[in-house]
Amino acid sequence: MTKGIDLRKLGEFGLIDRIAQRLPAGAGVALGIGDDAAAFAPAPGQLSLITTDMLVEGIHFDLSYSDPLSLGKKAMSVNLSDIAAMGGKPRHYLLSLAIPPAITLDFLDTFISGMLSRADQFGVQLIGGDTCSSSGPLVLNLTVLGEQSPDLLVRRSGARPGDQICVTGTIGDSALGLRLLRQGDRQGVAIERHLDPVPRVLEGLALAEATIPSAMIDLSDGLSADLGHILDLSAVGARIYSETLPLSDTFREHFPTVTAEALSLALAGGEDYELLFTVPPEKIPLVFSLLEKFGTPVAVIGTITAENTRAVIGSDGREISLNKKGYDHFSSRD
Ligand code: ADP
Ligand code: MG
């Protein structure tokens, strides 16, 4: 416990000061925390990117199994992941908190430590926010600002027939981890992936700078839903081959055979925070050579089609229709 100080004594402005004092000095912001608005000079010729994501207690996290350090990292990571999916460079962020009475100063200090450590890892700087009390749940909202030049920005709408569909890392671990947490487990690779996902910021930026992806999105809602967004906005279809889906050793230990249940966790489970992107076939070798430099695995899992198909092809060669939610269609396999 933080002896002698509680949040009530510290007050709103005390808490803001406490956060501000923990920030590294300098780093090129004209006005940070303390005035009515922050001010910074945008880099010449760059578009500003801005994204916000809110974590609400009881909806996105449960304090019975989410520790404040991981929560701080995750709040940062889910926002950074959106900048990564644009191929952008994250630069600044804002933090807004709605704090119920049961939350201790100790909890907040640790949450801030997690957030700052992940921010520091990717060179982003806190420039402001808002702080209030909550009569309901704890609400943690981050807004991340980034930049990229207009010609390098990667949209969801650029996928073309014949493009290959790639995904970084492995999928389904976070959903498996959440399931294990709810069953009472507290440790393991899958749980770690759920509580502390690491965003693919460097990979997204490098892919964009090498003009490799035709479209890109980060996996927050599950591969089938997020691929659906690319397909909708690009007006194309896709065929995914279930055998090529990248599943971790941990995932395969839980599911030695890829059952319908395993497929639904991998395709519709969500919160993977991997990058899903489409690539013209001639650039596929570049994808492997580039991501190898980061030690980041990448899998080619399917092809973009001209017709509006959304199919997962099973190991038996049968087609399974892929709907936007994913989940229900796979249960019809059994
Ligand atoms: P106002 O009343 O004008 O909205 P505030 O008192 O909310 O101003 O904020 C004062 C300063 O503190 C501003 O620079 C704001 O960006 C910053 N701030 C408030 N809450 C936070 C927070 N949770 N994290 C970082 N900066 C914050
Ligand atoms: Mg305010």
Image: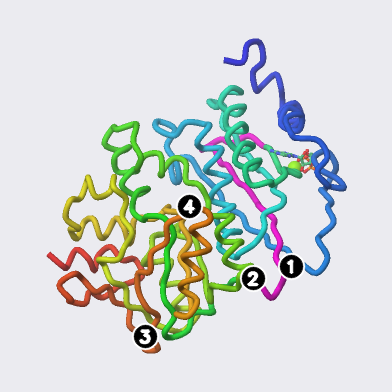
Q: Residue 33 in the image: x percent, y percent?
A: 80, 40
On the picture, is 92 further left or further right than 56? right
Callout 1–callout 4 Cβ contact below 8 Å: no
Q: Earlier in the sequence, mark 1 or mark 2?
A: 1
Foreground pick, 120 / 60: 120
* Whether the residue under disc 4 has CB within 8 Å of ligand 1: no
Q: Residues within 10 Å of mark 2 (few under 14, many from 20)?
A: many
| Circle 1: element type | strand
Q: Tell me the mark number nearer the camera, choosing from 4 and 2.
A: 4
Is residue 136 covered in magenta?
Answer: yes
Instruction: Name which residue lies at 60% across and 46% down.
Output: 141
- Between marks 1 and 4, how big is the CA–CA gap? 29 Å
Instruction: Name which residue lies at 73% across and 27% down.
Output: 18
Instruction: Tell me which segment is drawn in magenta.
Output: 132-153
Amino acid type at image mark 3: Asn
Q: Residues within 10 Å of mark 3 (few under 14, many from 20)?
A: some
Single out the residue that lies furthest toward the top.
4
Q: Ligand 2 is found in which quarter of the picture? A: top right
Q: Which mark is residue 47?
A: 1
Which image quarter holds the C terminus?
bottom left
Callout 1–callout 2 Cβ contact below 8 Å: yes
- Asked if 256 appears above or below 136 in the picture, the reply is below
Q: Which residue is mark 4?
A: 295
Q: Which residue is mark 3?
A: 308
